[in-house]
Image (cartoon, helix red, strand yellow):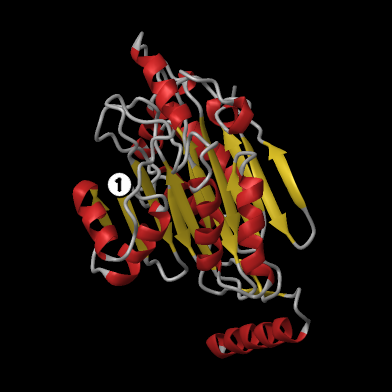
């Protein structure tokens, strides 16, 4: 009888939730997660330039489109922007003057795709999605990723813009590698400082659509003047991005080596599973990073951004200066993130 009473109780709760309207909530019995029923889409992304990316993603979400389509559409905006020197076309090159791109994408069904060290393709996020949808693999890298892209209709282009080339040539005069904290926003448009070294070069985006499904995307040109072949956290599922449609999703920006050590985005999601809010989960993850590398972590910048199934979002960073952008039916805003230091 006890089991039957529990079944009837939960059945009635579920029925009541369905009857209370579009903004009602339904309790997930398996993991105690509160889930919006429908009609409350949201998109969040890293840094100030995420605002333009969010606007493109919102056009998809506002029409009832899927979160997967929204995040791909959104991050393609900075990928194609020659004035954004941290993502895609116009990204600052490696030490050999080669622009190599990394990207990954993940949907509500745990499907994921990634490309690493991809050259000559403006939209690596779209190649990553094609890896997810058209191959039995998760990751393609280097020449193999390029071959796959070209065989599927992508156009080969020169990604090294005149301004990025000039910055690289200036850097070659000294070949001094010292990452600058929070140079991400400086490197966007008129704030670009030629010769500066990126500490974190990423746009990470997470969205929830009207069905309550979550997807995410992450794309980058990586650290400026990195060693050729270096890959950071951005295309690594679980590090730069992770989506669990029962719980929420998270993305990271910053020095990828530190994020990879703790599989940061996955850790954020697992902390949300335990009941932490998005902001608190991000903070706990940053604290874990410091515990793992107490000497190195405080010298760099890393930020985490998360969204849960309630539609709540939050972020936390190692250093001051990290920002993120939000777009939903109530606001279009840029938030300044709390930090440890």
Residue in the foreground of this view, choosing between 57 and 18: 57
Determine the residue positioned at 32% across, 29% down: 94
The residue positioned farthest toward the top in the image shown: 174
Is 210 left or right of 78, judged from the image as shown? right
Residue 14 in view: yes
* Residue 168 versus residue 324 in the image, above or below: above
Quarter of the picture containing the N terminus is bottom right
- Where residue 195 appears, as percent x and y from the top left, is 46, 18
User: Badge 1: few (under 14), some or many (20 or more) residues near its Cα, within 10 Å?
Assistant: many
**Corner quadrant of residue 259:** top left
- Where residue 88 appears, as percent x and y from the top left, is 44, 43
Determine the residue positioned at 70% across, 85% down: 18
Residue in the foreground of this view, choosing between 171 and 217: 171
Q: Secondary structure at mark 1?
A: strand
Determine the residue positioned at 23% across, 46% down: 142
Determine the residue positioned at 29% across, 66% down: 152
Is 73 left or right of 162, judged from the image as shown? right
Quarter of the picture containing the C terminus is top right
Residue in the foreground of this view, choosing between 288 and 299: 299
* Residue 290 versus residue 259 in the image, above or below: above
Residue 246 in view: no
Give the mark count.
1
Residue in the foreground of this view, choosing between 45 and 92: 92
* Residue 224 versus residue 280 in the image, above or below: above
- Where residue 22 appears, as percent x and y from the top left, is 75, 78
Please name the residue that numbered disc 1 is placed on.
118
């Amino acid at each position: 009888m006890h089991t039957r009473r529990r079944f009837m109780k939960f059945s009635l709760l579920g029925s009541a939730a369905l009857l209370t309207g579009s903004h009602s909530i339904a309790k997930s019995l398996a993991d105690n997660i509160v889930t919006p029923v429908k009609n409350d889409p949201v998109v969040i992304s890293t840094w100030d330039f995420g605002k333009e990316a969010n606007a493109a993603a919102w056009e998809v979400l506002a029409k009832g489109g899927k979160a997967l389509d929204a995040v791909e559409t959104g991050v393609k905006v900075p990928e194609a922007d020659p004035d954004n020197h941290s993502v895609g076309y116009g990204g600052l090159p490696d030490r050999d003057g080669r622009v190599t791109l990394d990207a990954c994408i993940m949907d509500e069904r745990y499907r994921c795709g990634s490309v690493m060290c991809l050259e000559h393709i403006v939209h690596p996020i779209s190649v990553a999605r094609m890896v997810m949808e058209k191959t039995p693999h998760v990751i393609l890298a280097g020449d193999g990723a390029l071959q796959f892209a070209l065989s599927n209709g992508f156009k080969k282009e020169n990604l090294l813009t005149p301004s990025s080339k000039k910055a690289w040539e200036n850097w070659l005069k000294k070949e001094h590698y010292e990452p600058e904290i929070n140079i991400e926003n400086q490197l966007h448009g008129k704030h670009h400082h030629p010769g500066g070294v990126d500490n974190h070069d990423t746009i990470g985006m997470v969205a929830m659509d009207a069905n309550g499904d979550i997807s995410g995307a992450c794309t980058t040109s990586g650290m400026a003047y990195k060693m050729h072949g270096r890959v950071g956290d951005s295309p690594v599922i679980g590090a730069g991005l992770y989506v669990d449609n029962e719980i929420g999703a998270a993305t990271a920006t910053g020095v990828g080596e530190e994020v990879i050590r703790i599989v940061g985005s996955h850790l954020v999601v697992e902390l949300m599973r335990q009941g932490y809010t998005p902001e608190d989960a991000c903070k706990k993850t940053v604290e874990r990073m410091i515990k793992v590398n107490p000497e190195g972590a405080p010298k760099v910048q890393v930020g985490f951004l998360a969204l849960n199934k309630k539609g709540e979002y939050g972020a936390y960073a190692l250093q001051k200066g990290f920002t993120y952008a939000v777009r939903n039916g109530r606001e279009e805003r840029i938030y300044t993130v709390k930090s440890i230091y």
